[in-house]
Image (tube, grey):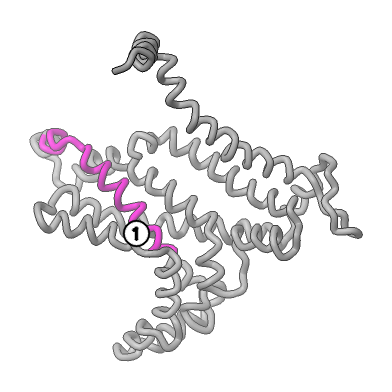
Amino acid sequence: MSGPLRRVSTFFLRHPQLTVAVLLAPPLLWLGVVYLGSLAALLVQSFFQIDPYTAKVVREPTLATYGELFTRSNLSIILRTTTMAAAVTVAAALLAFPLAYFMARHARGRLRALLYVAVILPLWSSYIVRVYSWKLILAKEGILSWFIAHLGLSPVLDAVLALPVVGGPSLSFSMLGMFLVFLYIWLPYMILPIQAALERVPRSLLEASADLGARPTRTFWSVTLPLAFPGVVAGSIFTFSLTLGDFIIPGTIGNSSLFLGQAVLRHQGTAGNIPLAAALTVVPMVIMAVYLAIARRLGAFEAL
C-alpha cells in the first residue's frame, strides 16, 4: 500500500468514531434531505389552503385544510380505509399463524424449503400483474365464479354480493373482492415475522410446561402464543400500513368508494388541491405513529 493510503487507513483505524461517522454520513444525508425533507415539505403544505375563487394555493399558515378532514365525505374515506386495513390485518393473522406454526415446529427438510418458496414466490412477480390477475379471477365470468357455479353455490355468492357495503355487481367490483386481494397480496408479510418469532421460542420452555403437567393446548395459550405475539404485532405493522396507503388495489378492484391513497392522488393530480392532499397524507402518518407506539410497547420491534 502506498504512503498516502497507508496514512489515511491508519488515521481512520485510530479514530473509529470518525470512521463510523464517515460511513454513515451519506445514507443519513440521503435520509435527512430526501426522505425527511420531503415529509417536512408535505407537512408544511398541509397548513396552506386553496383559494375558493382563484383555485390557487394561499401560502399562509392556517388550520382550515385540516378542518376539511372532518367533513362527512373525508371522514367516511378515513373510516373506510382504516376499517379495511384492520380487517385485512386480523384476517391475515388468523390465516398466517397456523401455517407459520407448522413451518416453525413441524415442517422439516424439503417440505420446509417448499413452504418457504411458496410463501415468498408471489413476491417475485410484479405487484401490478398480481392485482390485475385477481381482477380476472374475481370477474363475473372469471374462474372463481365458474368454480362456484359448478359447485351449485351461485345462490350463496349472489346473496353475499347483495349485501350492503361488502357486495356489488361481482366480486371484482365489491369490497369483499378488494378484501380478498389485499389479504392475498400482504399475507406473506404476516407469515414471515410470525414464523421468525415462533423459531425463537425455546423448546426447553415447551418441555418444561409439559413436565409440569400442562396439556399441549394449555402450553400453546400460556407459553407459545405470548412469546410469539410480538411477531404477530410485527407482521401487523406491515399489513396494516401497506393496506392503509395502497391506492392501486382500490382503484382496480372494488366500487367507486374512495380510499385514502386514491383521495390523495385525486386531490394532488386531478383537482390540484395540494394542501388537502397533504393533509390527507398526514392522517395515515398519525395513525401509524400511534400504532407503532403501541407495537413498541408490545415488543414487536424485537421480532422484526
Q: Is residue 95 magenta?
A: no
Residue placed most toward the observer, 268 or 165? 268
Residue name at image x 63 percent, y 42 percent: 38
Q: Position of residue 252 (x, y in %)?
A: 52, 72
Q: Position of residue 177 (x, y in %)?
A: 46, 73
Q: Which residue is mark 1?
A: 123
**Residue 282 located left or right of residue 137:** right
The amino acid marked with disc number 1 is Leu
Quarter-of-image position of residue 77: bottom right
The magenta region covers 182-207
What type of secondary structure mainly makes up the magenta span? helix
| Position of the C terminus by quadrant | top left
**Residue 283 located left or right of residue 301:** right
**Residue 284 located left or right of residue 208:** right
Residue name at image x 57 percent, y 45 percent: 287
Rendered position, 51 above or below 27 = below
| Element marked by disc 1 | helix
Count of labels shown?
1
- Count residues near mark 1 (Cα–Cα under 10 Å), then give few for <14, some for 14-19, many for 20+: some
Quarter-of-image position of residue 82: bottom right
**Residue 264 located left or right of residue 276:** left
Residue placed most toward the observer, 275 or 178? 275
Q: Is residue 193 magenta?
A: yes
Residue placed most toward the observer, 294 or 120? 120
| Position of the N terminus by quadrant | top left
Residue name at image x 65 percent, y 57 percent: 264
